[in-house]
Image (cartoon, rainbow, N blue to C red):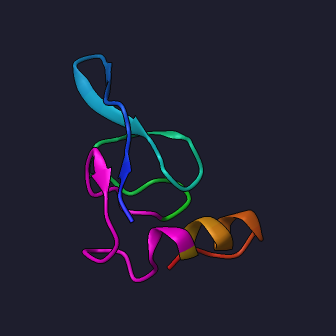
Amino acid sequence: MKTTTEIILINGEECIHCPVCERIVPLFDVCECNWENTGETNIDGGPNKMTLAEAKEAYAKGLKIK
């Protein structure tokens, strides 16, 4: 599953809304919710152990994202 998010420029830094919790986070950075953003198109695999769908479900239930 791919999630395309609009890039937001904040003080010259590229940021996106985290696809899990919607906080604004720098592109390719780890969000406060523990999801590592893989860019404008957040894909499953890569640095995250959970899929994006699993992370969203865990976050909604108040569980820790791995």
In the rendered picture of this protein, how many numbered marks are placed on residues?
A: 0
Residue 17 inside the magenta-drawn segment: no
Q: Residue furthest right?
A: 61
Q: Residue furthest front?
A: 1
Residue 52 inside the magenta-drawn segment: yes
**Residue 63 at what x, y percent from top left?**
70, 75
**Residue 44 at what x, y percent from top left?**
34, 72
- Give the residue at x 56% y 76%: 54
Q: In the image, which residues are magenta?
A: 35-53
**Residue 40 at what x, y percent from top left?**
28, 44
Q: Nearer the viewer, residue 42 or 36?
A: 42
- Give the residue at x 55% y 41%: 23
Q: Main secondary structure of the magenta part?
A: loop
Instruction: Relative to 40, say whether 55 is above or below.
Output: below
Q: Quadrant of residue 6?
A: top left
Instruction: Relative to 26, say whether 53 is above or below.
Output: below
- Give the residue at x 24% y 27%: 13
Q: Nearer the viewer, residue 4 or 63?
A: 4
Instruction: Relative to 26, say whether 3 is above or below.
Output: below
Residue 49 appears left or right of 66: left
Q: Quadrant of residue 55?
A: bottom right
- Give the residue at x 56% y 43%: 22
- Pick the quarter of the image with the N terminus: bottom left
